[in-house]
Image (tube, rainbow, N blue to C red):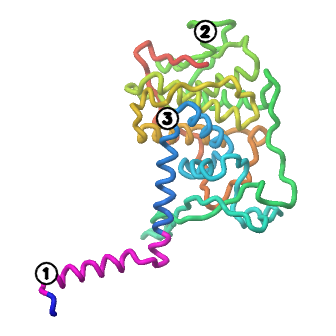
Amino acid sequence: MRDDPTTSALKAQAAAAAAATAPTPANDRKAKVEALQQEIELGVTQLRSSEGWKEWLDASSKFHNYSFGNQMLILSRRPDATRVAGYRTWEQLDRHVNKGEKGIPILAPTVLKKVDEDGEEHRITTGFRVVHVFDVSQTDGKALPEPPAHRLQGEAPPGLQSALDHELTSRGFVIERPDGPYAGEANGDVNFASRTVRIRSDLSAAQQAKTTAHELAHALMHEHEATMPREQKELEAESVAYVVCKSQGLDTSDYSFGYVAAWTNADTKAVRASAERVRKTAGAIIDSLPDDSTSGDAGSDATAPAAGPLSPAGAAVADAPPSGGALAGS
């Protein structure tokens, strides 16, 4: 029996759809990328809790050169990871991946190089592909340099305070160090109207570094964010300080974070946007620190573009609140 035109058309459409979804290499790659993207979005929902947020910050302090999405994938697949790198990078470090180990899937950009009329080369991201990295615990071989030891209470890495101060003064801020508390119990604050940052001088060296990192985060993120809730600004600044300090081996046990969903109305897009600001700003600060105070990262791989030079992290700079432009820090 011959099909009528409508039936023939429907069959043709079905055949075309089947061909488009057939398990070809291209479709398989696309499906894997989409599956990882969905895994990232699922992980973002976990950040709405204080515990989930802090777990991500711990991962960010170890893998600040990795994108937010890849940090989430590493945290999801191997939450106990400490240093990750690709197969070839481990070989370059005179280590080999142990037989039978399964890599951690992350996303790497597919880059196309184009030369313009002036002969300048441009790199254009055309999509993503799945690559795999391995934690140091999955490898064996030559010993790696040890990360910074956990410092005793009150201590700070040499050069850390001066480096943080420099980032503030290079942006036109004057640092004042009054004796004793002021503005309530605050350890420090930033005033965008007067371009001043105050840090209590009677604090321990470690606490002064923590407070300076907090105020620097405000300076980088919040100068022009007048509509952002104050609670969100404080969470972001404290999160940046936490990541920076933890990466330097400072004691971070006294840090706590409020319920993230309180200011986002459980909006995962808002949570992700805030996390991206924190990651970029913390990564930029870490990259600006002197070599002897930054932690070595075996995870710097071709698949993980490093953060750029210290800047407002592309995610805005800060906001002058109604109260004269000052933001208190901890």
Mark 2 element type = loop
Amino acid of disc 1? Thr
Residue at point 55%, 37% (across, down):
278
At x 63%, y 28%, the residue is 213
Position of 46 relative to 160 (above/below) = below
Instruction: Say which quarter of the image contains residue 280.
Output: top right
Q: Which residue is mark 3?
A: 48
Query: Magenta: predominant secondary structure element?
Result: helix
Q: Tell me the CA gap for discs 3 and 2.
A: 28 Å
User: Element type at marker 3?
Assistant: loop
Residue closest to the eye, 211 or 45: 45
| Residue 219 visible in the snapshot | no
Q: Of callouts 3 and 2, which one flags the residue occurring earlier in the amino acid sequence?
A: 3
Give above or below for 113 relative to 255.
below
Quadrant housing residue 309: top right
Quadrant where the C terminus is found in the figure: top right
Name the spot of residue 141 as percent of width and height, x first.
Answer: 86, 61
Q: Seen from this angle, which residue lies furthest bottom?
A: 1
Q: Nearer the viewer, residue 159 or 108?
A: 108
| Mark 2 residue type | Glu
Residue wearing tag 1: 6
| Point 56% across, 35% down: residue | 53
Of the two numbered discs 3 and 1 in the rendering, the one whose residue sits closer to the viewer: 1
Q: Is label 3 in contact with label 1 (beta carbons under 8 Å)?
A: no
Rendered-image quadrant of the N terminus:
bottom left
- The residue to which callout 2 is attached is 185
Image spot of residue 107 (x, y percent): 55, 59
Numbered label attached to residue 291: none
Write the start and end of the magenta stretch as one range.
4-29
